[in-house]
Image (cartoon, rainbow, N blue to C red):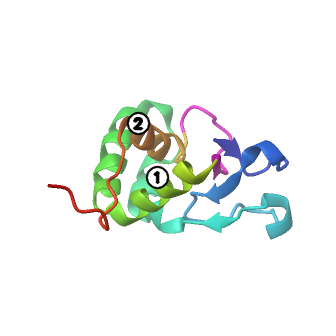
Amino acid sequence: MKRAREAASIDDGMRVLVDRLWPRGLTKEQVAADLWLRDVAPSDALRRWYAHEPSRWAVFVQKYRTELEQRPDLLRLLDDLRRSGRLTLLYHASDAQHNQAVVPHQVLSERRFSDPRIQRS
């Protein structure tokens, strides 16, 4: 995970922006995202409710995980990108511990997503 404001590094690998809104005041060149997955970000309603209040973090995480469960296609895509090389999730928030990249990072770390093209017996 890395703030979108931080300079890109060769060590970042694939850079994926996971914000619903484009980072204010930053150009495409400054963000240097290879992919913008705005639909993996929390819904507008959840994002507004949370309002970057650390006291709401635990509830935010639960609600955001519920939203992510509704988008297995996007989680599978992120997992595929992670399996193919280094993956850096970009976020715009100033809080490195309480931001929208933390939750998908945790979910990806906890699970492996099966490839629907592979049949298992």
Q: Quadrant of the C terminus?
A: bottom left
In this rendering, would 78 be left or right of 60? right
Q: Which mark is residue 59?
A: none
Q: State how far apart marks 1 and 2 are (Cα).
A: 27 Å
| Viewer-side residue, 92 vs 16 | 16
Which callout, 1 or 2, points to the residue nearer the camera? 1
Residue 44 image position (x, y, % from top left): 45, 64
Left or right position of 32 against 39: right
Q: Is residue 6 visible?
A: no
| Residue underneath mark 1 | 79
Left-right relation of 45 to 38:
left
Indicate the secondary structure of the residue bearing disc 1: helix
At a point 20% along the width and 56% down the height, the residue shown is: 120
The image position of residue 74, as x and y in percent, is: 42, 63
Residue 62: x and y in percent read: 31, 41
Which segment did they paint magenta? 86-98
Q: Amino acid at mark 1?
A: Asp
Q: Which of the pair 38/63 is nearer the observer?
A: 38
Dot 1 crowding, Cα within 10 Å, few <14, some 14–19, many 20+: many
Q: Amino acid at mark 2?
A: Arg
Question: Along the line of sight, which residue is nearer the eye, 8 or 10?
Answer: 10
Q: Give the labeled residue for mark 2.
A: 56
Q: Main secondary structure of the magenta part?
A: loop
